[in-house]
Amino acid sequence: MAEHCEITESLKVFRDNFNQNERLKKMNRDWDRVIAIKATDIDSLHTLTLRKGDLSLREGASETPDLVVISDSETLADLFYGDVTPTEPYLNGTLKIQGSEDDIIRLDFISLMIWGE
């Protein structure tokens, strides 16, 4: 089990890698989304907000999210550190993503661009 602070740190790494990738920022400058990240086994809730190609992070809930990423704390930390791809936990049911199929595919693409396969 990961702690809340570990999830926070993994999300900071994800945010920083996104914001340092000019190609990703340009590709997503018109995809404004709010993404809630929620752990199922500990009290941990974060919000990633993408506006005009810039990704920000805050602890807690924010406005109504477009996407909700739900998993156990360890999977979330591993996912946003880039230690695992979303595919395996998604297929085995430990990772749930609520939102439109297009948004889910876009988030998966962003992860792939940041971390590779």
Image: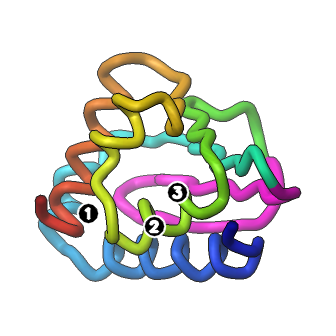
Q: Secondary structure at mark 3?
A: helix
| Residue on which disc 2 sits | 78
Say left or right for 21 vs 70: left
- Mark in the foreground, 1 or 3: 3
**Neighbours of disc 3 within 10 Å: few (<14), some (14-19), many (20+):** many
Quadrant containing the N terminus in the rendered view: bottom right
- Kind of element beneath mark 2: helix
99 is higher (above) or lower (below) than 5: above
Q: Is residue 77 above or below residue 88?
A: below
**Where residue 61 sits: x, y (%)?**
81, 49
**Marks 2 & 3, CB-CB < 8 Å contact:** yes
- Between the residue at mark 2 and the residue at mark 3, the CA separation in whole angstroms equals 5 Å
- CA separation in Å, label 1 and label 3: 25 Å
**Quadrant assignment, res 20:** bottom left
Residue 102 location (% of width, % of height): 30, 22
Segment tinted magenta in the rendering: 42-61
Residue that badge 3 annotates: 75
- Dominant secondary structure (helix, strand or loop) of the stretch shown in magenta: strand
Q: Residue at x 45, y 67 (%)?
A: 78
Snapshot quadrant of residue 89: top left
Instruction: Note whether 96 is above or below 50 in the view shown.
Output: above
Q: Are marks 2 and 1 in contact (CB under 8 Å)?
A: no
Residue type at mark 2 is Asp
Q: Residue at x 48, y 53 (%)?
A: 50
Which of marks 1 and 2 precedes in the sequence? 1
Residue linked to disc 1: 25
Which sits earlier in the primary sequence, circle 1 or circle 3?
Answer: 1
